[in-house]
Image (spheres, rainbow, N blue to C red):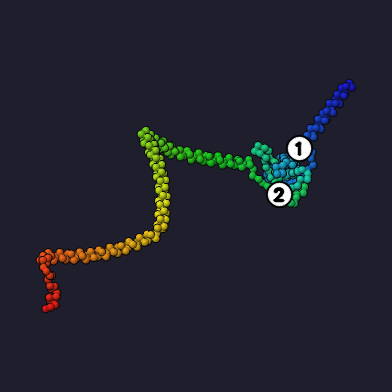
């Protein structure tokens, strides 16, 4: 009997210890075991938020949602959320609280965006609420818009399907015509033409290179000729002077030859008219002199 009492007592102590450990673990998980400061914020919607939801500051979890109450502010129905934040945490007065999510499949939480002011909020004061876009609602609206546009595109495709079939038929005919044109002997001729075009292009390139080389040589020859002319300029000037003198002498000789030719022609004419002039001892009297004597 005494042994049974000891066993019952041991079992009872064990159960109490386990119950205390369970309570401690629950308090640790819920965060109630740590001392915290309460701040408040007002939001138009608390979709996905319930009591005990995490509260994060710039992504760092430091508390939980302590209470959610409906309240009237400025004639609108808002929800007043009590945020239990780690005691002593510094929150700038221009910080903002909003509903956010750490991932696509994770739960919703209250995110506090840190402000830039040096003044700090005191426990019990309000953190301005910021209505961020609901990601799931945005995805739903996007999906609805995409479905609507897909349906519209599908209807347009169905309406244009006969025209597309005609266009595909024309494309098939054009492809067959191109295949017929480029096939067989025509294809070989086209290949030969392309080959000749490549050869001609190479020849033109070679000719262009040779012309450039020739131009460089001509430029060099012209430069050398200019140098020779500049070097022999005095001798060339002297030669030109002598040529001018010789030409003047030649002109004088030609002038005398022209006079002699005229005299010879006159003599020949007179001999034709009067061949006896060759055997006369003296020339006949000039007619002009005879007239003067008279």
Q: Residue furthest bottom?
A: 294
Q: Position of residue 272 (x, y in %)?
A: 12, 64
Is residue 274 in view? no
Q: Residue at x 70, y 42 (%)?
A: 59
Circle 2 — which element? loop
Q: Which of marks 2 and 1 is nearer the N terminus?
A: 1
**Rounded to the nearest whole Å, what is the CA distance between mark 2 and mark 1?**
27 Å
Asked whether 272 or 189 is in front, the reply is: 272
Question: Which residue has dot 1 on it?
Answer: 30
Label 1: few (<14), some or many (≥20) within 10 Å?
Answer: some
Quick one: SS at disc 1?
helix
Identify the residue shown where x is 72% and y is 40%. 53
Residue to which mark 2 is pinned = 115
Residue lying at the far right in this picture: please name it: 2
**In the displayed structure image, the side of residue 147 where residue 166 appears, left or right:** left
- Where residue 274 appears, as percent x and y from the top left, is 10, 66
Residue drawn at point x = 77 percent, y = 43 percent: 86
* Residue 252 appears in view: yes
Residue 199 percent coordinates (x, y): 39, 40
């Amino acid at each position: 009997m005494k042994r049974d009492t000891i066993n019952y007592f041991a079992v009872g102590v064990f159960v109490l210890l386990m119950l205390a450990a369970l309570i401690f673990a629950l308090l640790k998980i819920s965060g109630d075991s740590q001392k915290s400061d309460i701040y408040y914020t007002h939001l138009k919607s608390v979709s996905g938020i319930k009591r005990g939801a995490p509260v994060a500051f710039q992504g760092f979890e430091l508390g939980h949602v302590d209470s959610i109450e409906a309240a009237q502010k400025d004639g609108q129905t808002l929800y007043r959320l009590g945020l239990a934040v780690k005691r002593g945490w510094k929150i700038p007065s221009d910080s903002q609280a909003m509903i956010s999510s750490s991932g696509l499949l994770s739960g919703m939480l209250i995110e506090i965006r840190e402000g830039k002011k040096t003044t700090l909020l005191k426990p019990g004061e309000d953190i301005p609420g910021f209505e961020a876009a609901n990601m799931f609602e945005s995805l739903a609206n996007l999906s609805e818009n995409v479905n609507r546009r897909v349906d519209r595109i599908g209807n347009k495709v169905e309406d244009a399907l006969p025209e597309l079939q005609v266009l595909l038929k024309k494309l098939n005919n054009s492809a067959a015509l191109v295949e017929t044109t480029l096939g067989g002997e025509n294809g070989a001729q086209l290949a030969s033409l392309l080959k000749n075009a490549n050869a001609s292009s190479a020849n033109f390139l070679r000719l262009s290179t040779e012309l450039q080389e020739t131009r460089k040589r001509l430029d060099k020859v012209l430069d050398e000729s200019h140098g020779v002319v500049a070097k022999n300029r005095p001798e060339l000037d002297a030669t030109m002077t002598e040529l001018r003198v010789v030409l003047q002498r030649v002109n004088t000789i030609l002038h005398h030859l022209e006079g002699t030719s005229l005299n010879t022609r006159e003599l020949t004419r007179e001999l034709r008219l009067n061949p006896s002039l060759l055997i006369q001892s003296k020339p006949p009297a000039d007619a002009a002199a005879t007239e003067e004597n008279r």
